[in-house]
């Protein structure tokens, strides 16, 4: 079902009220939002899926639409079908009014309950009635939610919900959407969260104790998540004056011994590139989260895209080692963030975690058994009197000390330097230091995270490859296709690539299809360049919308006819 309304009208409020109630009824839920870059007006929408099994994908089909602006039909009509249930005011829908529409006086219910502010609660009550959810679950939740605002506010909210609920009960049973059977016993072992929260949980589990950022959507949510829990977990939070200051503050904190990270979007990461290069030269760990959105320039600041892989892969001048991760599920987001901190600490490099607006804002259920806690280590040694910060070693990794822990001096320098950190212009020292810094790439490749296989990749003729947030949509599309000719592979680490992981793509024996939200097929190019994989088809999308399940099914069917 989809709720459509203007910015400032409160459709996110409807979602935030509905999701806990629906989950308490024993259903799995998935929700994602698309919204315009404006504070007031326009037309935004939020989708809620109610499913019998965990789902992590956007679908185009709308079974129930709550339309609250005159733009609803214009923007969403291609997603409607002949049995779509539409609640709207006829004056807003105009000439597009038909037998699927039901005149819905939400504004009248809100006024009767106490004011226009209660319109969203009336909408919530209406939907719950149509879905067959008992009103008591709603009123119990409202009493808990608004208890701190006084009994009058509680009563007005429950009255608004009741009015909407009574209206919804009038809908004939044959017009109501059929829901999957709930499984309340399964809900005891699940949590509900969005991608931003999952990343924040992973950072806390990893021991992150310093975050610095200049706010830029959609990456800002990680900053605010950690800031809200800073006192509990001992996290220093710094809102910098710009992105250059943010990454340099993060490197300074890391030099002093903190587990530091920064969070931004592509446009902010542009400004951090010199800091990335600095991290590579001074061998100082830092985690950088990039919440991708469409560019170039400001682009579509509130939409989604996977257009910053090349940026992360090549950011910064000179040659240095980095790792890049791109989680595709809530569980992966929690685990990958821990892995990112561990990789940064052990290899003394910058590590990038790539997400996007779709993954960060989407809400779904996650099984408790999907949440993994990895060992958290700091990898810091106590320095001796003769300590050399850049000592040559067999694996290229020098023992890392921090100022004040031991008797040694911990020198770092952005110029080329010798083993103790003093500037040098020696050609031989330069050669050895470059080899030293790049040597760790071999170990990174050996330890690279293997991709996840979806289906039977050995027997399949066609392998669909995705990375990052497209995992859920591919999983569901392949399940619906139910065609043994297809299998899928999802990469949650996109640099460096696991050699044996790339090998499962068939070495030329299979047809490879790469699906990604960008214009040029950045990951397809990377696969081909690094491993010689011949990509026979690229399914690309640059509208700022996520792929829908229906869209992927249609595109994959075309592959068999091509």
Image (cartoon, helix red, strand yellow):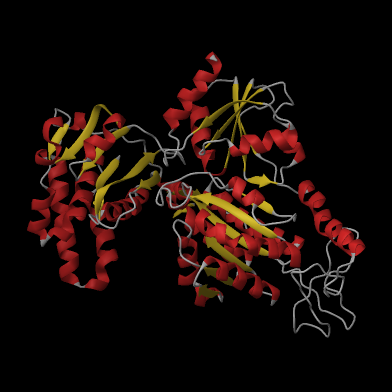
**In the shown orientation, is residue 190 left or right of residue 123?**
right
Residue at 15% across / 49% down in the picture? Answer: 164
Residue 433: image quadrant is: bottom right
Residue at 62% across / 38% down in the picture? Answer: 523
Please identify the quadrant where the N terminus is shown: top left
Residue 405 at x, y = what percent?
77, 82
Residue at 54% across / 70% down in the picture? Answer: 212
Residue 344 at x, y = what percent?
70, 61
Q: Who is closer to the viewer here, 203 or 148?
A: 203
Residue 458 at x, y = what percent?
69, 25
**In the shown orientation, is residue 441 left or right of residue 392?**
left
Residue 422: image quadrant is: bottom right
Please identify the quadrant where the C terminus is shown: top right
Residue 546 at x, y = what percent?
44, 39
**In the shown orientation, is residue 7 left or right of residue 164?**
right
Residue at 24% across / 35% down in the picture? Answer: 74
- Marks counted in the figure total 0
In the displayed structure, 547 sits above or below 15; it is: above
Residue farthest to the top, as pictured: 561
- Regarding residue 374, the answer to whether it shows in the image is no
In the displayed structure, 14 sits above or below 287; it is: above
- Regarding residue 330, the answer to whether it shows in the image is yes
Q: Who is closer to the viewer here, 254 or 462?
A: 254
In the displayed structure, 209 sits above or below 518; it is: below
Q: Who is closer to the viewer here, 194 or 537?
A: 537
């Amino acid at each position: 079902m989809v709720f459509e309304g203007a910015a400032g009208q409160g459709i996110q409020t409807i979602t935030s009220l509905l999701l806990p109630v629906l989950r308490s009824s024993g259903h799995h839920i998935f929700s994602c939002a698309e919204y315009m870059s404006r504070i007031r007006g326009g037309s935004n929408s939020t989708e809620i899926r109610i499913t019998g099994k965990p789902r992590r994908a956007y679908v185009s089909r709308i079974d129930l639409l709550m339309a609250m602006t005159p733009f609803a039909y214009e923007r969403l009509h291609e997603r409607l079908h002949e049995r779509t249930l539409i609640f709207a005011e006829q004056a807003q829908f105009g000439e597009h009014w038909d037998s699927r529409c039901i005149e819905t006086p939400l504004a009248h219910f809100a006024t009767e309950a106490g004011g226009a502010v209660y319109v969203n609660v009336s909408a919530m009550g209406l939907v719950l009635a149509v879905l067959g959810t008992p009103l008591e679950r709603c009123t119990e939740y409202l009493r808990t939610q608004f208890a701190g605002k006084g009994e009058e506010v509680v009563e007005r909210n429950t009255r608004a919900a009741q009015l909407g609920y009574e209206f919804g009960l009038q809908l004939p049973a044959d017009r109501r959407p059929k829901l999957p059977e709930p499984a309340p016993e399964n809900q005891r072992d699940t949590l509900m969260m969005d991608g931003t929260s999952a990343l924040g949980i992973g950072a806390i589990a990893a021991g992150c104790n310093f975050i610095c950022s200049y706010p830029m959507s959609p990456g800002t949510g990680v900053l605010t998540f950690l800031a809200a829990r800073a006192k509990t977990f001992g996290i220093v939070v710094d809102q910098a004056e710009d992105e250059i200051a943010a990454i340099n503050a993060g490197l300074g904190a890391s030099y002093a011994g903190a587990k530091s990270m920064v969070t931004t979007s592509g446009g902010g990461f542009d400004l951090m590139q010199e800091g990335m290069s600095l991290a590579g030269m001074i061998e100082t760990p830092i985690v950088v989260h990039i919440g991708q959105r469409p560019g170039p320039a400001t682009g579509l600041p509130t939409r989604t895209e996977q257009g910053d892989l090349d940026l992360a892969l090549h950011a910064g001048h000179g040659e240095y080692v980095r790792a890049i991760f791109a989680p595709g599920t809530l569980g992966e987001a929690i685990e990958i963030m821990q892995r990112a901190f561990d990789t940064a600490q052990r290899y003394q490099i910058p590590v990038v975690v790539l997400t996007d607006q779709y993954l960060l804002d989407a809400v779904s259920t996650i099984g408790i058994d999907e949440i993994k806690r990895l060992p958290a280590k700091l990898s810091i040694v106590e320095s001796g009197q003769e300590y050399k910060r850049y000592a040559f070693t067999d694996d290229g990794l020098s023992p890392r000390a921090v100022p004040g822990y031991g008797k040694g001096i911990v020198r770092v320098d952005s110029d080329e330097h010798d083993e103790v950190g003093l500037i040098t212009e020696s050609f031989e020292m330069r050669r050895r230091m470059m080899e030293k810094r790049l040597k760790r790439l071999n170990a990174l490749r050996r330890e690279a995270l293997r991709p996840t296989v979806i289906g039977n990749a050995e027997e399949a003729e066609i392998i669909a490859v995705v990375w990052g947030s497209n995992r859920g949509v591919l999983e569901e599309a392949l399940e619906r296709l139910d065609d043994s000719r297809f299998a899928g592979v999802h990469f949650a680490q996109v640099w460096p690539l696991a050699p044996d992981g790339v090998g499962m793509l068939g070495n030329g024996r299979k047809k490879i299809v790469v699906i990604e939200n960008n214009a040029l097929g950045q990951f397809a190019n990377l696969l081909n360049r690094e491993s010689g994989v011949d990509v026979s088809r690229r399914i690309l999308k640059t509208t700022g919308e996520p792929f829908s399940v229906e869209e992927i099914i249609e595109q994959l069917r075309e592959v068999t006819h091509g």
